[in-house]
């Protein structure tokens, strides 16, 4: 078991140098292995990481997806699991997520406890991450599965306090998520407020579909932006 070593150090180094990072999020439920070669060939050259995960994916699908990705890409593959069953040794690292914006113990700690038996024997790099669900204008899969409500983008103080609570409790990353297919991404004013408060890297995802939206997220302070739906639909930013 490895705790926050090489990949996390690279994230810290990039944040300190203000080098902006970009991850593509691949949902095993939607992954088409037959189109994988073309998919990776057409990804933008500025992609730095590959996230793998979904709210309802099965372990076998996650493992197959990671193995397929490894055939076509040398980028770091990081698990972004919806639950403890989506852990596979074939990836390079895992975001050890806690849904700190919600109050459902299942996703605050219970799923994490269930994952320990597998992670204890794993060589995955484990990166403790505070996950904050932000209202993206429509109900997302995370909201349905976790049975928690997102925080309004107008409640910047609550979002910021939640992010700091995550940092103070030992999280190494904070992830602001508007949800897959969000109609609106996390607002610049939200990103800026959280970034000013934190001393750890900030990830932002959900609802980003254009180059302009991507640049706004970076300018507001996102250290790493995650895009899923836009790339699934063939967009090239």
Image: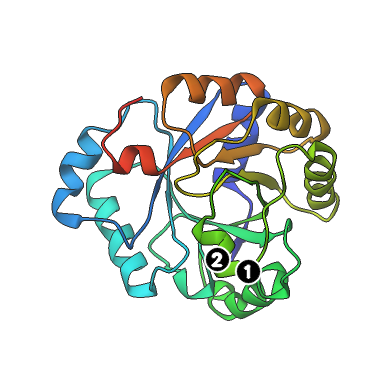
Residue behind mark 2: 144
Say which element carries label 1.
Answer: loop
Compared with 88, 133 (above or below) is above
Q: Which mark is residue 161?
A: none
Question: Is residue 130 found left or right of 182 in the rendered image?
Answer: right
Question: Is residue 223 found left or right of 91 in the rendered image?
Answer: right
Question: Is residue 186 found left or right of 228 in the rendered image?
Answer: right
Q: Quadrant of the N terminus?
A: bottom right
Q: Residue furthest front?
A: 138
Compared with 4, 120 (above or below) is below
- The residue depicted at 72 percent of the width and 26 percent of the height is 189
In the foreground, 229 or 119: 229
Compared with 173, 95 (above or below) is below
Percent of width and height locating residue 161: 85, 45
Residue behind mark 1: 147
- The residue depicted at 67 percent of the width and 75 percent of the height is 106
Mark 2 Cα shell of 10 Å, populated few (<14), some (14-19), many (≥20) = few
- The residue depicted at 69 percent of the width and 45 percent of the height is 174
Mark 2 touches mark 1? (CB < 8 Å): yes
């Amino acid at each position: 078991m490895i705790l926050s070593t090489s990949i996390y150090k690279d994230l810290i180094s990039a944040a300190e140098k203000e080098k902006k990072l970009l991850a593509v999020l691949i949902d095993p439920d939607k992954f088409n292995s037959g189109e994988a070669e073309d998919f990776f060939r057409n990804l933008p050259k500025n992609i730095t990481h590959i996230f793998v995960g979904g709210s309802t994916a099965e372990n076998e699908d996650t493992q197959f997806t990671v193995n397929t990705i490894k055939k076509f890409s040398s980028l770091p593959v990081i698990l972004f699991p919806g639950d403890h069953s989506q852990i596979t040794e074939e990836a390079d690292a895992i975001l050890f997520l806690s849904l700190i914006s919600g109050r459902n113990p299942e996703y605050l700690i219970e799923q994490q406890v269930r994952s320990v038996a597998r992670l204890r024997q794993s060589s995955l790099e484990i990166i403790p991450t505070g996950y904050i669900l932000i209202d993206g204008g429509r109900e997302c899969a995370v909201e349905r599965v976790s049975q928690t409500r997102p925080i309004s983008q107008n409640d910047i103080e609550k979002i910021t306090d939640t992010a700091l609570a995550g940092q103070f409790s030992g999280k190494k990353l904070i992830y602001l998520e508007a949800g897959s297919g969000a109609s609106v991404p996390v607002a610049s004013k939200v990103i800026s407020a959280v970034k000013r408060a934190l001393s750890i890297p900030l990830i932002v995802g959900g609802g980003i579909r254009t180059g302009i939206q991507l640049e706004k997220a970076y300018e507001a302070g996102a250290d790493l932006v995650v895009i899923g739906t836009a790339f699934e639909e063939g967009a090239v930013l």
